[in-house]
Image (cartoon, rainbow, N blue to C red):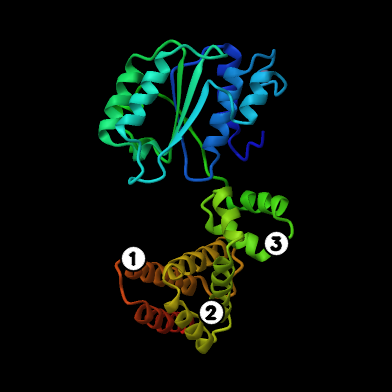
Amino acid sequence: MELLGNEAAFRRLEKMIASGRIGHGYLFTGAEGTGKRTLARWFAKAILCTGEHPPCSECAACKKMERLSHPDYREYSAEDRARSFPVETVRQIRQDCAVLPNEGKKKIYCLSNVQNMTMEGMNAFLKTLEEPPPHGVFLLLCPSAAQLPETVRSRLVQIPLQPLPWEQVEQVLTQRLADTDPGLRRQAAILSDGSVGLAMKLVQEPEFAERAKLAQDICQSLIHRREYELAGALAGLEKDGEGFLQVLQLTQRLLRIQLERDSFPLPQKQQLRLLELLEQARLRLAGNAHKGLTGAWLAIRMTEAVSMP
Ligand SMILES: [Zn+2]
């Protein structure tokens, strides 16, 4: 299995499997794309494996898990609040869990986005966690442990997953999407917050290619102090509603990386001022400021910044 930076979490699960002591509840936390589901599925496969070195990937149980067709493994997901886990789903899980496993020794339920569970659902689920049947194993996935009530959290073994540094995300993109533009891969990696999933999605989005080019143009016009180009690039953002924020964020990160590496050809004082201005513009946009005006304001202020002594 590809670990992508989560060796520590993986080793912990491996030890639990080797010791044969499997608990009833686990909470995998981490941002989107950090590999929560991949790791949870690996864990489930290892628990259900009937081979000598679980997961052996050879026994019938492993094969079934690879096809996600093992009768003792179920996945549920709440994509958003509107489609959150209704209390009926939790009741179904409780009923199903009360029945003995079909083939294995355990019955495993993997629940994604549990932060979207309704309070009613959560309370019903808590009862299951308080008195789990001996064969029940619950793998809960959510971005942050703080999103769950303490009563639920305290009954779960927490497995926190860390986002990858962008350089590592870039390496993965280079392997998996070798025929895409290297500059684009780098920018997607920088914007991905360590999520390989998100970075892969970005690289393949035509809008992202345009936005990445704009962010690059903004940086270039700042370096060469070309105020008309800068104004032009920022004016173009007015039409791209969602993209405006993304371009500002990307520009900010590109500048910051160059600042850290000491590779931006402008004085540090000017760079810091630029970062500050980009942040202000982001806050204005987040507060629903007029896009055209914000773009024009930013162009004027940034031009001033790069002309500072
Ligand atoms: Zn196996």
> Foreground mark, 1 or 2?
1
Give the SS element for disc 2.
Answer: helix
Residue 308 in sight? no
Residue 285 is situated, as x and y percent measured from the top left of the image, at 35, 69
Q: Which residue is mark 2?
A: 222
Q: Earlier in the sequence, mark 1 or mark 2?
A: 2
Where ligand 1 lies, by image quadrant?
top right
Front position in the image: 15 or 290: 290
Which kind of residue does numbered mark 3 sit on? Thr
> Which quarter of the figure is the N terminus placed in?
top right
Q: Which residue is mark 1?
A: 286
Quarter of the image holding residue 180? Answer: bottom right
**Badge 3: residue crowd in 10 Å (few <14, some 14–19, many ≥20):** few
Which kind of residue does numbered mark 1 sit on? Ala
**Badge 2: residue crowd in 10 Å (few <14, some 14–19, many ≥20):** many
Which kind of residue does numbered mark 2 sit on? Leu
Q: Earlier in the sequence, mark 3 or mark 2?
A: 3
> Foreground mark, 3 or 2?
3
Q: Are marks 1 and 2 in contact (CB under 8 Å)?
A: no
Q: CA distance from mark 1 to mark 2?
A: 24 Å
Q: Residue at x 68, y 51 (%)?
A: 171
Decide: is 288 above or below 131: below
**Badge 1: residue crowd in 10 Å (few <14, some 14–19, many ≥20):** few
Q: Which residue is mark 3?
A: 180
Q: Which mark is residue 85?
A: none
